[in-house]
Image (tube, rainbow, N blue to C red):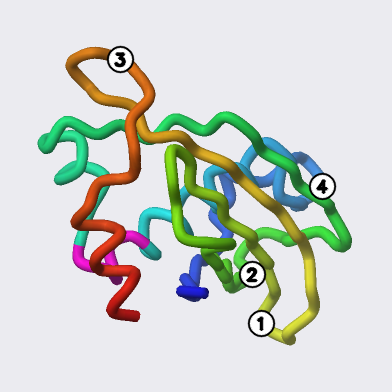
Amino acid sequence: MKKNTTKLRVRYGETDQMGVVYYGNYAQFLEQGRTEWLRELGFSYKWMEENNVQLPVTHLSIDFKYPARYDDLIYVTTTLRKIPTFKIEFDYEIHNEEGQLLVTAMTTLCFINTTTKKLMKAPSYLIEKLSES
């Protein structure tokens, strides 16, 4: 399935007193990976919201293997699990610069109509773009 790798540098404010990335910040790293995955397809969250689609996270699962630390370069690999329906599922791996696996994760998001606030099918433009890949 469609995959993207996003390079990030761990900032000081993302770490705790020991210089280790605070666990809550990994959700933001995953979001950055997802955002770049979507951007690589030619869309942005902003554009989708302007076109009446919201994507709230309904499930998040993270397995921590090793810590990321201040000033590390990390690589967030975001992989689509399957063609989306009413929901879209991603798998993630975060590696450090040496290639060591730090984190595996999974998220599920659903498609919500901005106006009605109701569940909707994945937009046809997204399905069409994924079918091309």
| Above or below for 3 versus 18 | below
Taking the view exactly as shown, the residue that stands out farthest to the right is 65
Cβ–Cβ below 8 Å for labels 2 and 3?
Answer: no
* Disc 2 element: loop
Which range of residues does the magenta coloring cover? 38-42
Q: Which numbered dot is residue 18?
A: 4
| Above or below for 42 versus 45 | below
Foreground of the two, 58 or 6: 58
Q: Amino acid at mark 2?
A: Asp
Decide whether residue 61 is among the magenta residues.
Answer: no
Q: Residues within 10 Å of mark 2 (few under 14, many from 20)?
A: some
| Tag nearer the camera, 4 or 3 | 3
For label 3, the residue is 117
For label 2, the residue is 72
Seen at 52% across and 33% down, the residue is 57
* Disc 1 element: loop
Mark 1–mark 2 distance (CA, rounded to whole Å): 7 Å
